[in-house]
Image (cartoon, rainbow, N blue to C red):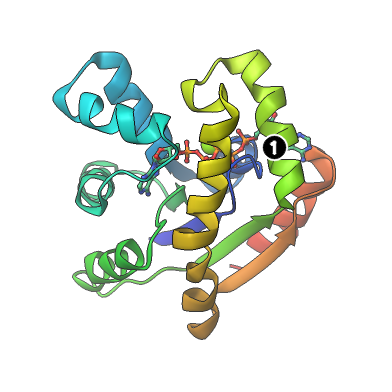
Amino acid sequence: MKYFILFGPPGAGKGTQASSMVEKYNLRHISTGELLRKEIAAGSELGLKAKSLIDAGALVPDEIVEGMIESEFRTVKGVAGFLLDGFPRTTAQAAALDDMLAKTSEEVTAVVSIMIPDEMIRERIKHRASIEGRADDANDETISNRIKTYHDKTEPLVGYYKAKGKYHEIDGTGTIEEVRAKICDLMDRF
Ligand code: AP5
Ligand code: MG
């Protein structure tokens, strides 16, 4: 199995690019953000717990998302691999992922990182807010906290994966099609 991590700040285009990548490379897309939003919509206990943290622009506890990922790995069959979007987001989650994969003598294949500057994050999220109505896109303070959380807790993963020789960065500032072409050039190598 191949395990790709689609990395990048909020609004970088992870979800946008994931849909064509899963088709082209026969991957299962796992977005922890989408899984959490489904729990919220279903009104589950987990969803209730996650909602206040997501609305504040904070991360949900590592164990919750690690459990979601492990259960997807166990149950999804018939694909060439997985495309992880929004996971891992802390060094603890990255270490937990390594441990999960080590159980079956597997490892992360590559990290595909889509990078955009903070100002573009705000523009893209504001644009999406008018289309999708995501609760965590609606308020400037939440967006600022998501950007801060990204820099404080998630950006250290760049060094984590560089040290393992798995980190590949793509300029995410072009059009959707330009970014897609760069991602495909990279993915074709694995
Ligand atoms: P999550 O759902 O993962 O949100 P996020 O990381 O903030 O990322 P987004 O989904 O906002 O951005 P995206 O990169 O997918 O951009 P998109 O393609 O939509 O997480 C939500 C919350 O859940 C977190 O804050 C946290 O609380 C919790 N959570 C999730 N995972 C967790 C974890 N592992 N641990 C703990 N907590 C976790 O694009 C954005 C917009 O830009 C769209 O409108 C799109 O059309 C547009 N766009 C995209 N590309 C381009 C382009 N090239 N040019 C112009 N416009 C573009
Ligand atoms: Mg997304």
Q: Secondary structure at mark 1?
A: helix
Identified by mark 1, the residue type is: Arg
Q: Looking at the image, which residue is at 46% across and 47% down? A: 86
**Compared to 90, does 177 lie above or below?**
above
For label 1, the crowd category at 10 Å Cα-Cα, with few meaning under 14, some 14 to 19 and many 20 or more, is some
Q: Which residue extends farthest front? A: 141
The residue under label 1 is: 122
37 or 17, nearer to the observer: 37
Pick the quarter of the image with the N terminus.
bottom left
User: For this view, does 25 lie left or right of residue 189?
Assistant: left
Q: Position of residue 79 (x, y in %)?
A: 40, 46
The answer to whether residue 67 shows anywhere in this view is yes
The answer to whether residue 188 shows anywhere in this view is no
**Ligand 1 quadrant in view:** top right
Give the mark count: 1
Q: Which residue extends farthest left? A: 45
User: For this view, does 147 lie left or right of residue 74?
Assistant: right
**Compared to 136, does 80 lie above or below?**
below
Pick the quarter of the image with the C terminus.
bottom right
Asked whether mark 1 lies closer than 8 Å to ligand 1, one says: no
Q: Looking at the image, which residue is at 27% across and 43% down? A: 72
Q: Position of residue 184 (x, y in %)?
A: 71, 54
Q: Position of residue 59 (x, y in %)?
A: 36, 46
Q: Position of residue 159 (x, y in %)?
A: 53, 77
